[in-house]
Image (spheres, rainbow, N blue to C red):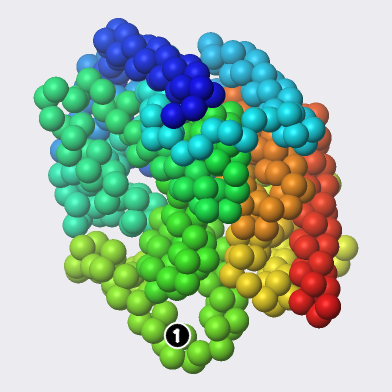
Amino acid sequence: MNILQKRTAFIVMAAFLLAFVFSIVSLSHYKGEEHLFSIQESHQLKKITNGISAPDNHSRDHRLPSGNGPASPSNSGEHVTPFHNLSMDNGAGSQGANKDYETPLALYTVGFFIAAAFVYALVKKKKWHHLIGHSRVILWSLLGTGLFIRIALIPWVGSHMDASLFKNWASVAANHFSNFYAKSGSDYPPFYIYILFIVGKVGSLPDFQQYFSLLIKIPPILADVVTSYLLYRLARKYLAPSFAYLLAIGYLFNPAILVNSTFWGQVDSFFTLLIVLAIVMITEKRIYASAVIFTAAVLMKPQAIIILPILFFELIRLKQVKHFFGIALTAAFTAGAILLPFSIGKSPTWIIDLFSSTIGEYPYASVNAYNFFSLIGANYKDSSATLLFLSYHTWGLIFIVATTVFSWLIYIKGRSFKYAALAALIQISGVFTFSSSMHERYLFPAAALALLAYIYLKDKNLLYLSLGFSISIFMNTFFVLYGDSNMQQNSTSYPFSMLATSMLNVLLVAYLVKVAWNLVQKNTFFKTV
């Protein structure tokens, strides 16, 4: 190990040790959360979170229990997970969010993006040292630091209202796995219920009951670390070692990633890991493995369908009919295996009904998504309302088709699996920005996909796009989480953060279109010379 490696390893190991100690101290002072929600209350919370008035409850004065009261069983005999300090009087995202750490998170974010710009300037001027080779000590210390910092933060930042839903579902899944949907009233797709089942089983153990609220956030936090590791491994194949470390650090400590999994407790990090793995399997020419992962992703979040065309593009590129049948059978068997435990005694179309119910929860032009429709004042406007002779829903479908056609064109002209990540980035960012019924977190995979596209195509503009999308994702998540928009209560309120970030997303997609087109034009030129 050279001198630079030794010094770097010492610094990183010191950071790892501090993060580990911080996590131990933080957990040792954690007292747990004692209040339990009933299933009916938690299901009602989900409707409110999604901006939809719950049946027979149109009053903002109605409050759910808060504080450190005794545990209350649900009507199904379940004990669900702890949560406290909730009020429906807060905004869409602010219910349950601990605002004590709003300012430190904002300051960290500013510092992160300044540091990112500074490091990139050094790289661009070739003043960054490229002498650090592969070192397991450095790599695992970095990943461990990111993991333990997140664990240390969980008790401090508290739980968001959505966490009560996941805790509820985890508890029900642990006790009534095959009968989960009848007992929970949930309309969440089934794949992540397997993860919640494990969390629920662990959380029910006496030694872990106090930490149930923390355990809910562990799967997405682990997904952050695994995605960072995966980006490092891929970058090692195509880029200089120091760049591999920079990309891993840039993703792992990205505030747009941190705010979602650690502060909010959402599962978009886990979903993004599946999407990244599916794209990587395409680039590794393992399309059947990609089909398995894509199927799991669709059965975790319906928006995976947005990126699913990339697998179809690759099948077209391969020009082998046998793969179409093989992929169809692979997807069918995978879906069957995932759905089977939940299908006993249900209609054969129950999963379609479940997806229809989930999609039907967002009949709006935008659901706090900082995109084109929010930019023109259509946030929480009915998607059937008219804009230039067509409904917002129709315009959304037109934009989805246009985005998919363009990403297909890029894939065809690129003539390589290396364009899979770029096409996926076009899909997720284009559909989020210009389609209707988008939610604030649907853009989340763009930060990882932009880095993945950079690894394969080595175009610095993709780094700019990753940085831009990270800012956009953070702004949208942060201001919804801490109640800036309050859209479901006041659809006429359009804060500056919404307008500025919506405009940023429109500009980023336009820039992405230009970058993608230039890349395939360059590729076509070199292949014809």
Residue pushed farthest right?
Answer: 388
In the displayed structure, 495 sits above or below 402; it is above
Quadrant placement of the C terminus: bottom right
Q: Amino acid at mark 1?
A: His
Label 1 Cα neighbours within 10 Å, binned few <14 / some 14-19 / many ≥20: some
Q: Position of residue 133 (x, y in %)?
A: 51, 37
Which one is in front, 273 or 304?
273
Relative to residue 163, is residue 282 drawn left or right?
right
Residue 512, position as x, y percentages in the image = 77, 54
- Tell me the quarter of the picture where residue 86 sits: top left
Determine whether 500 is above or below 446 in the image.
above
Which residue does the image show at 39% across and 84% down from the upper left?
326
Q: Secondary structure at mark 1?
A: helix
Residue indicated by mark 1: 323
Residues 245 and 108: in front is 245
Quadrant where the image shows the N terminus? top left
* Residue located 83% across and 58% down the image: 514
| Residue 68 can be seen in this image | no
Left/right placement of residue 75 relative to residue 231 reads left
Residue 415 lies, in percent from the top left, at 67, 76
> What residue is shown at x 60% (from left), y 40% (from top)?
243
